[in-house]
Amino acid sequence: MIERVTKENLDQYEAFIKKHPKGLFQHSSKWAKVKSAWKWEAVMLRDEDGNIKGSADVLIRTVPVIKASLLYCCRGFVADEDDFATFDALFAALLDIAKEYHGYCIKIDPEITVENKAYKQHLLSKGFVELNPGCMDFENVQPRFVYCFDYNGLNEQELMLTFKPDYRNRIRKAPKKGVEVKVMGTEALDDFVRIMQETGERDNFSTRPKSYFEQIMNCMGEDCRLYMAYYEGKAIAGTLAIKWGQNVMKYQYGASSNAHRNVYPNYALQWAMMQWGMECGCKVYDFGGISGDCQNPDNPHYGLWRFKHGFGGYMKEFIGEFDYVINKPVYHLYNLATKVLEKVRK
């Protein structure tokens, strides 16, 4: 039986997505509050005994002029990935929601690895169209390639032995050189944003305003931590980590100053987040996105992979991003307008 998520059953929904192996913070109503410019809807499927078998949620944004909506199912459904009957029931429920909001497209980018060819084939059989097939960098909304490691029940000493020797040395040297890592509240966001802007200028990417990070910390509560690294009393680096149940410890945002990189604040920050994941009993530490062409020294994202690779771990490749087009004229018109705007802004 399909059930719409409401205030009355929201706690049951949140408990399910925190416990299920496919549950991520992006599926939570907490994260929907971070994305306040979007509306949010969610559905659950129960079995005959009333147990929740799966769930799906969408962020909904209405395009003002055409008064049609995009429904974005970030990181896919929360259900066993080989249970296509549950997938079909949840998808049918999303189509009903799409009708309510005059949806022109449902976008989905499941955290399903490429090894599961049947899942991708099922998406295509339902009428989904793959976007950017074969993409290797960051063309999609969410990274197609991520870097992570499994905790595997290791203690701190055992975990550190999986790192490269020079990484272990840098983690140990950082406090000896005077680096102090602290868990901070929103009062430290001015420093974090300042360093983030410095990082964006150095690495050529756009940065978020202070209000966005403040929103994350306020909405995610105890599931989020801001780590700041200080040297000689001054903030020189920071990271924002989000945990979700015992599934994942996610390195969500990071920033580092151009100064004092020789005291290894970034290594100390990673280690602090990894320790938190260990304390929480997390199964996976997620370093975030990398390029699929990451081992190519000529790739501009090579340094990102090299830093993360030193901590051990492995690369995951997901099946990609897919659109289910409901209203073709609106879909093509919107995509055309978006491309024109991108050219104008360049």
Image (cartoon, helix red, strand yellow):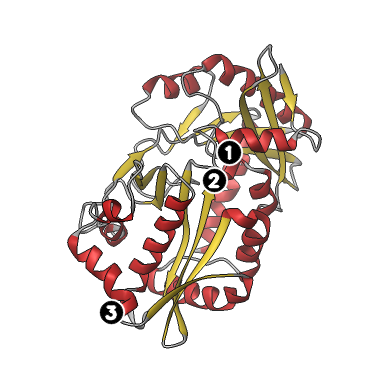
| Left or right: 279 as drawn, with respect to 26 | left
Name the amino acid, label 1: Lys
* Mark 2 nearby-residue class (10 Å; few <14, some 14–19, many ≥20): many
Determine which quarter of the picture holds residue 166.
bottom left
Determine which quarter of the picture holds residue 272.
bottom left
From this viewpoint, is residue 105 visible?
no
Q: Nearer the viewer, residue 141 or 147?
A: 147
**Image point 48% across, 41% down: which residue?**
247
Q: Which residue is mark 2?
A: 244
Q: Which residue is mark 1?
A: 18
Between marks 2 and 1, how big is the CA–CA gap? 6 Å
| Left or right: 265 as drawn, with respect to 90 | left
- Mark 1 residue element: helix
Q: Position of residue 196 (x, y in %)?
A: 48, 72
Q: Nearer the viewer, residue 101 or 315?
A: 315
Query: Which circle's residue, 3 or 2, is located before the other in the chain?
Result: 2
Q: Which residue is mark 3?
A: 262
* Mark 3 nearby-residue class (10 Å; few <14, some 14–19, many ≥20): few
- Mark 3 residue element: helix
| Left or right: 100 as drawn, with respect to 280 | right
Q: Nearer the viewer, mark 3 or mark 1?
A: 1
Query: Which circle's residue, 2 or 1, is located before the other in the chain?
Result: 1
Between marks 3 and 1, how big is the CA–CA gap? 39 Å
